[in-house]
Amino acid sequence: MSLPPLQAGWAEALLGQPVGSEPRSTCADCAMASGPAPAFRADLKCCMYLPRLPNFVVGRILADPTAAREPVRARLADPRQRTPWGLERPADWSAAYAQALQDGRFGQQLDLRCPHWLDADGGTCGIWAHREATCSTWHCRVDRGAVGKAMWTALRRWLEDVQDLVARWCVEQVGRPQTWDAAEAEAFYRACGQQAEGLTLETIKRLGGFGLRIRSRELRATWRERAHRALPLRLEAGRWRVVFEDTQTVELRSYGDYDGLTLSRGAFAALAAFDGRPVAQVMRGLGAAAPDPDSLQAWVDHGLLQSSDPHDGLSRPAPRSQDR
Ligand code: SF4
Ligand code: SF4
């Protein structure tokens, strides 16, 4: 999933590079809705969600003839969802969603499917080029495991702050309408979309002040960490759980509910050898059973192993779970 063009430009201006995508989140052929035991319904995927759409995003959708605009107009016609800052979630939807999460039904409850979902091509997004912070950063599977997830989480938080800042700025620029029916709201949102069009990161930074600087620092730090592959000198067991095993393999999960690593029985036995001693010593002891460098890096990235040196910067808490 790549970011929508407007947000991609702001993020690239901060990071100096395009954000890119996560190839293991194979949305067209959903990784979570295929295989022998799919976790999500194929007609729902991870789109059991109702995005809060900032005013300028709504305006850009309404001005885009290639976007599916009718569901946006339907939300706009609902006075519970329409606000000057954007389209909100109704309280009853949020309550039903919270209950579904509590019941472990994410990816299962069709009546909570996003109104922007399109059935075409096995399920696509009608506002793909305009997705908001959560939709554009959420991935079920991430190449570098917890290290990558930490970057996407930091990016989501940064984008959420940017969205809120830009939405408030648009309200100031355009001016709140005196009356607020659906037709006036549509004109207002369109004007917000035009305002945001040429907004630069420099202006957004000025609007964001100290709070956005903290978020930007967090994002840049996780971005650098994701780009940097390094192994700690000493490793010990991380926190993981077995989600599947047979006579040949063991599937382990650590940092998230949807992503894991499948190890051969031999590799699983080797994992237990990392007990805090220097990595080089453990690898020598394992001999031919030692993992190759890429596998060892993946074990660390996924949190199956962690540094046993408390002063090592690679020791990190698990990232907080996302808003869906
Ligand atoms: S991010 Fe969502 S749509 Fe994409 S592969 Fe994962 S669950 Fe499926
Ligand atoms: S806006 Fe698009 S990506 Fe987000 S939940 Fe809805 S259909 Fe899925």
Image (cartoon, rainbow, N blue to C red):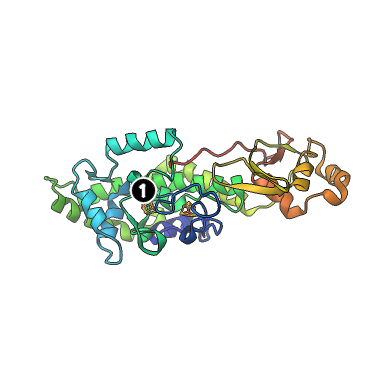
* Residue 224 screen position, x and y as percent: 60, 51
Please count the marks in the image: 1
Residue 80, picture quadrant: top left
- Give above or below for 284 relative to 31: above
Judging depth in this view, the residue of 269 and 13 nearest the camera is: 269
Evaluate whether residue 192 shows in this view.
Answer: no
For this orientation, the residue located farthest to the left is: 179
- Crowd class of label 1 (few under 14; some 14 to 19; many from 20; radius 10 Å): many
Label 1: state its secondary structure.
helix
Query: Looking at the rendering, in which quadrant would you find the C terminus?
Result: top left
* Residue 219 screen position, x and y as percent: 52, 47
In the displayed structure, does residue 179 sit left or right of residue 255? left
In the displayed structure, does residue 137 sit left or right of residue 241? left
* Residue 244 screen position, x and y as percent: 63, 43
Q: Which residue is drawn at 14% across and 46% down?
A: 180
Judging depth in this view, the residue of 89 and 54 nearest the camera is: 89
Judging depth in this view, the residue of 84 and 99 nearest the camera is: 99
Amino acid type for the residue under numbered disc 1: Gln
- Give above or below for 29 relative to 311: below
Q: Which residue is drawn at 72% across and 46% down?
A: 247
Evaluate whether residue 66 shows in this view.
Answer: yes
- Give above or below for 191 relative to 323: below
Judging depth in this view, the residue of 143 and 10 nearest the camera is: 143
Q: Residue at x 61, y 46 (%)?
A: 260
**Residue indicated by mark 1:** 163
Tell me: is circle 1 under 8 Å from ligand 2: no
In the displayed structure, does residue 137 sit left or right of residue 146? left
- Give above or below for 242 relative to 34: above
Residue 81, picture quadrant: top left
* Residue 66 screen position, x and y as percent: 30, 66
